[in-house]
Image (spheres, helix red, strand yellow):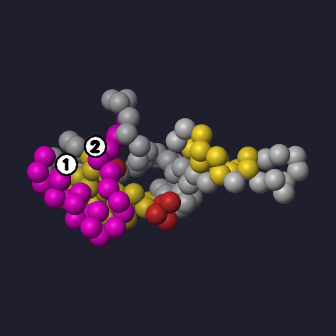
Amino acid sequence: MGIGLGSRCKTYDARLEPCVWTTNEPEAPDVSKFMVIKMEQVGYNIVVYINYPNCSNYEGNKICVYRNADFTDFIGLDKLDPHFTDVTTKISPFARFEPTKEGWDMAVKLTRMI
């Protein structure tokens, strides 16, 4: 039986002793374990296709758009968080897209417009 609690979906399994709650949420990406698959520079902005091997949704793939960034901003990074943040000392995406061919194409189109 599923019980919705806020934005999280929790499931209770009555067969487990003692009572244990399990989650159906995908595993968050480990920001220190990533691989940049491809990049496309468009003016002062860049589209980056990133894979996080431990992440369970979309096989760990993310497409992010970064404003006022270029290839050199990604050289030697030991961490790359695909989540939005307002911390100015950290590289943060401006937008994220579904990691598909259509998502990549839309990310590039947006980047050309901004």
Counting from the top left corner in percent of width and height, residue 9 is at 59, 48
Q: Which residues are magenta?
A: 90-114
Q: Residue at x 52, y 51 (%)?
A: 29
The front one of 30 and 56 is 56
Is disc 2 surrounded by few (<14), some (14 to 19) or many (20+) residues within 10 Å?
some
Counting labels gives 2
Q: Residue at x 29, y 70 (%)?
A: 101
Query: Can you tell which quarter of the image residue 105 is in?
Result: bottom left
Query: Can you tell which quarter of the image residue 106 is in?
Result: bottom left
The tag on residue 106 is none
Q: Is residue 110 above or below residue 102?
A: above
- Give the mark nearer the N terminus: 1 vs 2: 1
53 to the left or right of 63: right
Residue at disc 1, secondary structure: strand
Counting from the top left corner in percent of width and height, residue 76 is at 40, 49
Residue at disc 2, secondary structure: loop
Q: Is residue 45 magenta?
A: no
The quadrant in which the N terminus is found is bottom right
Residue type, label 2: Phe
Q: Is residue 71 above or below residue 59?
A: above
Q: Residue at x 87, y 46 (%)?
A: 18
Q: Residue at x 27, y 50 (%)?
A: 65
Residue 93 in view in this figure: yes
Residue type, label 1: Asn
Q: Which residue is mark 2?
A: 94
**Which of the two marks, 1 or 2, is nearer to us in this view?**
2
Q: Which residue is mark 1?
A: 45
> Looking at the image, do the residues carrying marks 1 and 2 touch, with CB atoms under 8 Å apart?
yes
